[in-house]
Image (cartoon, grey):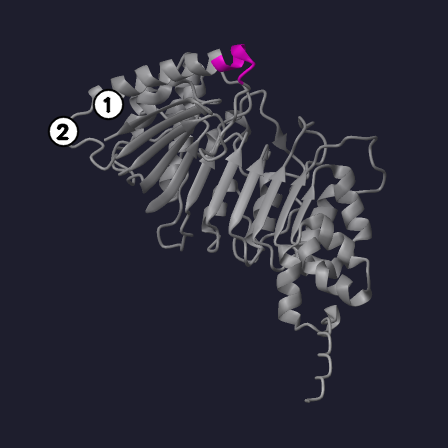
């Protein structure tokens, strides 16, 4: 009779700290942010391991949060930041002895690996005050980030050093106190917004609610290297204008300067051929004469694969003029929806009949405009176009396959 076999030893559980560092990092990257923060307070080694994940995506929605970050987060943690979103809205009482500009400069100077930057001035500006989001400061900061690929700007003030004050509409605020922004190592004193198009690493540029009317003669040196812009978003001017058509040439100039090709162009503003820009007064006619070049020999617009139109900002009656401007861009797909991204579908509450009916009415108008556009196409026009999608709700949509 054989002797009984000894019991097998139970498997030893692997200790967390005995795992390879690469595996630990992979595990941390798969955890939700709340779990990462909980793990970070368990021990010193876990804290160090979690720091890159904790600070990879930093959102500062107010001046108060910007102050707290600048005062309490060690500067060396800046190397972990990959994405930074800053809004200058002030929710409480004015902060004493605190400069949002200095805080922003300090944070960005340590964010050597930053890839995505979003800056927004969330409240109306008072021109006599120092404005932390003027174009000269924004351009200088963005051009100093060696890994920047995504730049999102909202409500950026134009600078008195970069525009002719005589051409600025009365209700557009201008930064008057940003002359102390030092020259950039590469751009020098040329810190106007169009200089963003010379950042070699830039791939996505979004400009929202910013006056661009002074850029109708935007001119990028053809000998200067330009980034390969994959996406350009323009939502137009947030300020009222006597004649909004005056800004159309500036928007077209921005699109032209991104050449030779753009994967996605997102518009929250209409475009119009120069022949459609009709001055409504002698003063506006004079402005057109000075600012808009009517030379037919200007550079061609870039090739564009995808055009997206934000139906919450662009009226349906401007579709034909926008499509006329972009007729030679080789666009293959057009999408129209509420918002600046066709994939971010707004789900309509089925119980809210009013909202749903509004969307259905809008859809009917867009369908009529698109049918009219398609019927007006001549031979050779829009030969590359393959699909048009209008999506205004979960079940409020229409598609044209061409």
Asked whether residue 56 is in view, the answer is yes
For the C terminus, the quadrant is top left
Pointer 1 local density, CA inside 10 Å: few below 14, some 14–19, many at least 20: few
Location of residue 151 in the rendering, given as x and y in whole percent from the top left corner: 54, 45
Image point (55%, 52%), residue name: 143
- The answer to whether residue 134 is left or right of residue 201 is right
Residues under labels 1 and 2: Cα distance?
11 Å
**157 or 330: nearer the viewer:** 330
Above or below: residue 168 compared with residue 385 = above
On the question of residue 190 being in view, the answer is no
Q: Which residues are magenta?
A: 350-356
Asked if residue 352 is among those painted magenta in the image, a careful observer would answer yes
In front: label 1 or label 2: 1
Helix, strand or loop under label 2: loop
- Could you tell me which residue is drawn at 70 percent across and 52 percent down? 107
Residue 173 among magenta residues: no
Question: Mark 1–mark 2 contact, CB under 8 Å?
Answer: no
The answer to which quarter of the image holds residue 156 is top right
The residue pinned by badge 2 equals 379
Using the image as rendered, state which of residue 126 and residue 311 is in the foreground.
311
Please state which of residues 151 and 308 is positioned toward the viewer in this rendering.
308
Residue neighbourhood size for the residue with mark 2, other residues' Cα within 10 Å, grouped as few (<14), some (14–19), many (≥20): few
Q: Is residue 173 above or below residue 304?
A: above
Instruction: Name the residue beneath numbered marker 1.
Output: 374
Number of labelled discs? 2
Q: Position of residue 384 (x, y in %)?
A: 23, 37
Image position, residue 73 (x, y; %): 78, 54
């Amino acid at each position: 009779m054989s002797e009984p076999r000894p019991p097998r030893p139970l498997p030893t559980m692997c200790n967390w700290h005995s795992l390879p560092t690469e595996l630990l990092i992979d595990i941390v990257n798969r955890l939700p942010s709340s779990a990462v923060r909980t793990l970070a307070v368990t021990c010193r080694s876990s804290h160090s391991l979690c720091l890159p994940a904790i600070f990879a995506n930093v959102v500062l929605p107010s001046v108060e949060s910007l102050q707290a970050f600048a005062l309490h987060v060690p500067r060396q943690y800046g190397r972990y930041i990959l994405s930074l979103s800053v809004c200058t809205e002030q929710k409480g009482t004015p902060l004493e002895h605190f400069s949002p500009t200095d805080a922003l400069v300090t944070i960005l100077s340590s964010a050597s690996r930053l890839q995505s930057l979003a800056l927004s001035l969330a409240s109306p500006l008072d021109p006599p005050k120092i404005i932390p989001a003027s174009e000269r400061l924004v351009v200088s900061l963005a051009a100093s980030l060696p890994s920047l690929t995504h730049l999102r700007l909202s409500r950026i003030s134009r600078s008195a050093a970069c525009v002719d004050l005589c051409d600025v509409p009365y209700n557009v605020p201008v930064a008057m106190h940003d002359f102390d922004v030092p020259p950039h190592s590469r751009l020098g004193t040329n810190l106007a917004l169009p200089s963003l198009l010379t950042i070699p690493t830039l791939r996505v540029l979004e400009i929202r609610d910013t006056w661009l009317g002074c850029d109708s003669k935007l001119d990028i040196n053809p000998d200067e290297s330009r980034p390969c812009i994959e996406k350009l978003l323009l939502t137009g001017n947030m300020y009222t204008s006597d004649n909004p058509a005056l800004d159309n040439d500036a928007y077209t100039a921005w699109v032209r300067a991104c050449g030779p090709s753009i994967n996605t162009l997102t518009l929250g503003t209409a475009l119009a051929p120069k022949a459609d820009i009709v001055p409504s007064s002698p003063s506006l006619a004079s402005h057109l004469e000075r600012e808009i070049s009517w030379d037919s020999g200007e550079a061609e617009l870039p090739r564009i694969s995808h055009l997206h139109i934000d139906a919450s900002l662009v009226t349906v009656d401007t579709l034909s003029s926008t499509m006329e401007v972009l007729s030679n861009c080789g666009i293959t797909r057009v999408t129209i929806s509420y918002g600046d991204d066709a994939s971010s579908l707004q789900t309509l509450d089925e119980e809210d009949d009013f909202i749903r009916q509004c969307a259905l009415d809008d859809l009917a108008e867009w369908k009529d405009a698109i049918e009219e556009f398609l019927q007006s196409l001549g031979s050779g026009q829009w030969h590359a176009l393959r699909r048009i999608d209008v999506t205004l709700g979960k079940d409020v949509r229409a598609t044209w396959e061409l």
